[in-house]
Image (spheres, coloured by chain):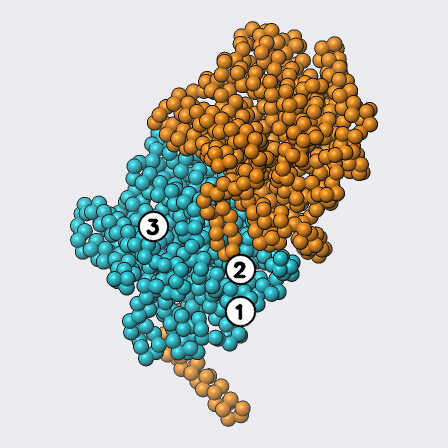
Chain colours: A cyan, B orange
């Protein structure tokens, strides 16, 4: 049963996609396609909650493991399973997909059937990616996410969609070539691509450095790390809102997840070597993106750059190489996924009604759309990292990790507290506050469907803020185990004052 | 004992219930019911809060902990939702609840002429109260930070309540961002505490202070005592919230919000959070003497600065706002010399009389139909007798005239500054006495301009009317507080019974005897503040009643000084030039040149290079057999030459 559960979750959306493709042919079937898609993804969500309930965080190592022979002679197998880290990302994917499909109702006006199929294929690929325990399998799923994602940008996007889609595809694909090289080198050295086996393989230190560099390039594009982000503003702002939500909410987390699993956890020694540079790049990304976000004139691009800025925070958290920092980074990935998706939905709700994304053309929306104003205020505050929202828990843990490394990293990374407030609040003010401008008095508040999409996101944001333990208890043991493995050497050299405190 | 803890928890959580019900359900249930719900919740919470105070008073304050839930527990970092029951938290909660209840009540009258529904306003007020209560009742620094940011959020919402006014939304953002600047340092300070103590819980931190006193931390290549660094960072956090010099610019602008908000947030509770933090962290501050010197300096300078600006402001609310800023300076000066109890005492009495002054000003503004310029008022005393009376009481208390509340607390601070007997504390004492004079002067300037001078607009004066019952009852109750709170509380807060009263919730190091010695000052020194206050009143009388032409002549003859004060020492202009404009310019530069030029240019150039490379490669394929044959021949010659001769 337990084996079947993970497979069912992974391939459920694929089956749903097939059904949609085969059944919902012809004209006028787009509504049916949406309902089938929504039903499938909700069913998968229910299954994922089942997975969550039957997962035992106290047991270290993989659960729900499946291993099937694939290219057995070469040490390659179809090996899937989840640990606490994988599980939370599976939950995030399962939670966001139905919302994205539901939100697609208004933003996607043509070819609904194909859109639903793409969304479900993306979901399958993401599940596969997060549960893969074989590097080759991971690679296959990682590349598989690209196809539906770039199609969604290219077909249903805005005016510059083709260029955006091409850039997105080429950048990510180019990055993952480095992963392919690393994969081949590792397979040659270890004779297997099984991830648990590779963790124990003990690569030579110099080789570790090169491998980590390759993974950094591959995932750094996806994350993105500064300065590999050229694809991001166009892709996020041209994509339709549900796709932006999925790409920034989950797909970029796949990069962070890869960086965690194949960078920090697999090559701890090389990670120590690289940490100062990545921390530097992370801090630069945080500040740079926050500056650029403030200057934007298009609301969606503000959110896009805000997402970039927060990914810098995640990179900083991961490469503090402390348990607090890594826990914080993982939690930040989850909460950021929820919040950024919600913000894209909020922005698109305004843009759909007014037919513009130009901030200067908007104003006074709050008076006509009080429900939207309330929800957007919540997500804005979450994006700023106000306590009581999930983002705060992530940020504070990252900062607590960062201060163990360096005062300046913590202070500069914490700059997001100020700069985030500056660009988010001025966006909120210019769009929602102020007097009514020209046709704004015709606006209608959120429909029931839109409220049904945003309210779950709001509830989860608050849940993560007030009781993060539901999530941290899943992945904290994994992180603690990994860090304590190497922490003995690290802490011996750290702050000397801790010693006599510990002695009392 | 258990009942007291339950009462305490109820007192803190009830305002949240009120805020949620009124905020989310206000649209459905209607304004009247929403108001009733918040008022009811606040009333019940206040009763519970006072009950808890009484219970603690009779059976001891603990400290006890009321665990509510687990919060962050990851990577060894642990913070919980736990309420702390000790003298400091319970007295602060009771004070916050009392003032907040009165402000809620007052707002019913004040907001009655709004065209939009006001349930939102009441929900925000209750939310603010909840956040403030979480702040004062926290048992670890992260929960304190929750309350700290929560009051920031609520003040942002309340200042920008009239969101169609550009000035209000700008002021709201300014308040939030300036506070956030300070909060960044605060959270980094918390981070250093976590590095040093491996905990953020008060009990564990305080217990480990003696062992940690020798720790050093390297910054800028110098080694500093770590506790000094921590206290310095925490104090920067406090400076933001309590509007101290350099981070004060948000407070006057925050007067764009409705007046009850100013009373609740910008006088009685939120701005005092910084002082509360310092008192709460007294075990750390006691081992950070250099930071305390800095605190005295900033406190005393703010105190003087704000009073000078308050002297010339034409706006009634801004005058009181600067007065708040100035009084907070006194409190920090007291913290700096280690007299935390005195600071908290002044905080408490100040809450009563400053809330009273703000609400009184609100009553005037309400009567004058949203007129805030004092020079357009005048002669109101007959029309608003109650407001006039309470404003006198508030001003007497603020100026520190015997036996009003301010006399007890402000004199105690000045005496403590004198008794501390250090160079910095004498500086603070001197500025404090000058400020006492200025305070009296601007308070009576306000009274004379608003109530006595010949009315600027007779029609408007005649149309003015006394406020409704909902507004006058809180005024009367606060006036009673402003009269008696000093006399009644002094023995417990700072007098002979203080150590029995505080029960260790405020810590004085063994060498710190300021609480015993501050009353032993020469008679002249003790009398001086009251004397200069009387002189200040007399001067105000001379300027605004006896010879009204004098101030204008003075302003003209000292033009630059007057303009310097009127423009608040040009802080806003300065910040505009060194922060706001460069920020926007950098943002624009990075976007246009960095982002669109370099980063996005790279893929574009790459595409162009690929395309033109392909075009060039195509050109090689000319189709001429002769050329191909010639190239082959040339190649063959080269290969043969290399093979044979090389």
User: Where does label 1 land, which residue?
Assistant: A269
Q: Earlier in the sequence, mark 2 or mark 1?
A: 1
On whether disc 3 and disc 2 are found on a single subunit, the reply is yes
| Element assignment for label 3 | helix
Dot 3 crowding, Cα within 10 Å, few <14, some 14–19, many 20+ = many
Which dot marks residue A414? none
- Number of numbered discs overlaid on the protein picture: 3
Q: Position of residue B397 (x, y in %)?
A: 67, 20
Q: Is residue A124 left or right of residue B121?
A: left
Q: In this view of the protein, can residue A436 be seen by the observer?
A: no
- Up-down relation of residue A321 to residue B435 (above or below): below
Circle nearer the viewer, 3 or 2: 2
User: Where does label 2 land, which residue?
Assistant: A322
- Of B133 and A207, nearer the camera is B133
Q: CA distance from mark 2 to mark 1?
A: 13 Å
- Of B112 and B626, nearer the camera is B112
Q: Position of residue A329 (x, y in %)?
A: 48, 55
Q: Position of residue A416 (x, y in %)?
A: 54, 47
Dot 2 crowding, Cα within 10 Å, few <14, some 14–19, many 20+ = many
| Element assignment for label 1 | helix
| Element assignment for label 2 | loop
Task: Give the quadrant of residue B37.
Answer: top left
Q: Residue furthest bottom?
A: B644
Q: Earlier in the sequence, mark 3 or mark 1?
A: 3
Which chain is mark 2 on? A
Q: In this view of the protein, can residue A53 be seen by the observer?
A: yes
User: Where does label 3 land, which residue?
Assistant: A95
């Amino acid at each position: 049963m337990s084996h079947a559960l993970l497979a069912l979750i992974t391939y459920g959306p694929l089956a749903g996609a097939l059904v949609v493709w085969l059944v919902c042919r012809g004209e006028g079937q787009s509504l049916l396609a949406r309902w089938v898609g929504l039903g499938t993804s909700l069913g998968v969500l229910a299954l994922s909650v089942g997975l969550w309930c039957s997962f035992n965080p106290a047991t270290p190592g993989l659960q729900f493991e499946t291993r099937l022979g694939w290219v057995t002679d070469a040490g390659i197998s179809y090996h899937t399973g989840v640990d606490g880290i994988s599980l939370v990302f599976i939950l995030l994917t399962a939670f966001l997909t139905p919302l994205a499909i539901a939100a697609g109702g208004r933003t996607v006006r043509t070819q609904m059937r194909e859109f639903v199929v793409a969304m479900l294929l993306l979901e399958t690929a993401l599940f596969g990616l997060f549960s893969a325990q074989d590097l080759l399998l991971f690679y296959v799923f990682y590349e598989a996410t690209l196809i539906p994602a770039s199609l969604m940008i290219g077909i249903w996007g805005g005016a510059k969609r083709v260029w955006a889609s091409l850039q997105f595809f080429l950048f990510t694909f180019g990055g993952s070539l480095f992963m392919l090289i690393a994969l081949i080198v590792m397979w040659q050295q270890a004779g297997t691509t099984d991830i648990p086996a590779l963790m124990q393989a003990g690569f030579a230190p110099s080789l570790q450095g090169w491998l980590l560099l390759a993974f950094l390039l591959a995932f750094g594009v996806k994350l993105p790390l500064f300065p590999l982000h050229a694809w991001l503003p166009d892709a996020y702002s041209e994509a339709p809102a549900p796709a932006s939500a999925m790409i920034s909410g989950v797909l970029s987390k796949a990069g962070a997840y890869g960086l965690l699993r194949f960078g920090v956890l697999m090559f701890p020694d090389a990670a120590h070597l690289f940490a100062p540079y990545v921390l530097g790049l992370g801090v630069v990304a945080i500040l740079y993106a926050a500056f650029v976000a403030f200057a934007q004139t298009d609301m969606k691009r503000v959110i896009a750059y805000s997402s970039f800025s927060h990914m810098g925070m995640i990179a900083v958290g991961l490469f503090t190489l402390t348990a607090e920092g890594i826990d914080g980074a993982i939690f930040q990935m989850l909460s950021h996924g929820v919040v950024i998706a919600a913000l894209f939905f909020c922005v698109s709700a305004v843009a759909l009604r007014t037919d513009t994304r130009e901030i200067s053309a908007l104003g006074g929306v709050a008076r006509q759309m009080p429900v939207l104003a309330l929800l957007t205020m919540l997500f804005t505050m979450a994006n700023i990292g106000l306590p009581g929202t999930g983002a705060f828990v992530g940020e504070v843990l990252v900062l607590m990790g960062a201060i163990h490394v360096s005062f300046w990293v913590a202070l500069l990374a914490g700059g997001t507290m100020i700069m985030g407030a500056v660009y988010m609040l001025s966006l909120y003010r210019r769009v929602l506050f102020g007097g009514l401008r020209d046709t704004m008095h015709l606006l209608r508040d959120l429909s029931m469907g839109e409220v049904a999409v945003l309210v779950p996101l709001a509830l989860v944001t608050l849940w993560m803020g007030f009781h993060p333990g539901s999530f941290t208890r899943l992945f904290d043991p994994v992180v603690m185990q990994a860090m304590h493995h190497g922490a003995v050497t690290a802490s011996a050299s750290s702050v000397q004052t801790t010693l006599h405190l510990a002695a009392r | 004992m258990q009942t007291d803890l339950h009462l305490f928890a109820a007192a803190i959580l009830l305002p949240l219930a009120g805020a949620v019900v009124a905020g989310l359900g206000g649209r459905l249930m209607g304004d009247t019911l929403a108001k009733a719900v918040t008022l009811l919740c606040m009333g019940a919470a206040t009763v519970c809060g006072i009950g808890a105070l009484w219970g603690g008073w009779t059976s001891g304050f603990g400290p006890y902990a009321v665990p509510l839930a687990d919060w962050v527990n990851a990577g060894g970092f642990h913070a919980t939702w736990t309420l702390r029951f000790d003298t400091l938290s319970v007295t602060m909660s009771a004070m916050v609840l009392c003032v907040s209840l009165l402000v809620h009540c007052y707002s019913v009258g004040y907001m009655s002429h709004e065209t939009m529904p006001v349930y939102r306003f009441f929900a925000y007020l209750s939310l603010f109260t909840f956040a403030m209560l979480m702040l004062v009742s926290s048992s670890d620094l992260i929960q304190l930070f929750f309350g700290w940011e929560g009051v920031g959020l609520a003040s942002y919402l309340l200042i920008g309540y009239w969101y169609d006014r550009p000035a209000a939304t700008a002021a709201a953002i300014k308040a939030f961002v300036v506070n956030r600047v300070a909060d960044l340092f605060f959270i980094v300070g918390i981070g250093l505490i976590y590095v040093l103590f491996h905990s953020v819980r008060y009990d564990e931190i305080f217990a480990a202070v003696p062992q940690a006193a020798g720790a050093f931390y390297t910054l800028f290549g110098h080694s500093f005592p770590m506790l000094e660094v921590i206290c310095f960072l925490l104090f920067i956090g406090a400076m933001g919230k309590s509007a101290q010099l350099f981070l004060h610019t948000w407070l006057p602008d925050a007067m764009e919000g409705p007046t009850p908000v100013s009373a609740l947030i910008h006088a009685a509770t939120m701005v005092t959070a910084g002082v509360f933090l310092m008192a709460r962290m007294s075990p750390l501050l006691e081992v950070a003497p250099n930071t305390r010197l800095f605190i005295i300096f900033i406190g005393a300078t703010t105190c003087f600065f704000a009073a000078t600006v308050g002297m010339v402001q034409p706006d009634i609310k801004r005058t009181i706002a600067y007065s708040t800023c100035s009084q907070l300076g006194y409190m920090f000066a007291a913290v700096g010399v280690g007299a935390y109890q005195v600071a908290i005492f002044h905080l408490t009495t100040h809450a009563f009389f400053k809330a009273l002054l703000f609400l009184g000003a609100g009553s005037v503004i309400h009567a004058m139909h949203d007129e805030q310029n004092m020079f357009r008022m005048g002669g109101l005393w007959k029309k608003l007798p109650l407001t006039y009376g309470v404003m006198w009481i508030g001003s007497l208390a603020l100026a520190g005239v015997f036996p009003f509340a301010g006399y007890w607390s402000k004199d105690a601070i000045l005496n403590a500054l004198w008794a501390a007997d250090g160079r910095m504390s004498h500086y603070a004492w001197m500025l404090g006495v000058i400020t006492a004079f200025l305070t009296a002067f601007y308070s009576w300037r306000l009274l004379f301009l608003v109530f006595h001078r010949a009315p600027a607009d007779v029609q408007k004066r005649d149309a003015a009317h006394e406020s409704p019952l909902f507004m006058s009852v809180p005024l009367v109750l606060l006036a009673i507080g402003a009269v008696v709170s000093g006399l009644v509380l002094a023995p417990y807060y700072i007098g002979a019974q203080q150590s029995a009263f505080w029960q260790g919730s405020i810590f004085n190091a063994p060498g710190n005897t300021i609480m015993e010695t501050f009353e032993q000052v020469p008679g002249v020194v003790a009398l001086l503040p009251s004397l200069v206050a009387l002189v200040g009143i007399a001067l105000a009388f001379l300027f605004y009643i006896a010879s009204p032409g004098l101030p204008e002549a003075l302003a003209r003859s000292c033009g630059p000084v007057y303009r310097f004060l009127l423009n608040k020492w040009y802080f806003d202009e300065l910040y505009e030039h060194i922060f706001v404009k460069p920020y926007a310019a950098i943002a624009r530069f990075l976007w246009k040149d960095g982002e669109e030029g370099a980063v996005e240019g790279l893929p574009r150039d790459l595409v162009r290079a690929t395309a033109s490379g392909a075009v060039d490669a195509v050109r090689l394929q000319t189709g001429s057999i002769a050329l191909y044959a010639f190239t082959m021949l040339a190649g063959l010659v080269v290969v043969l030459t290399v093979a044979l001769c090389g």
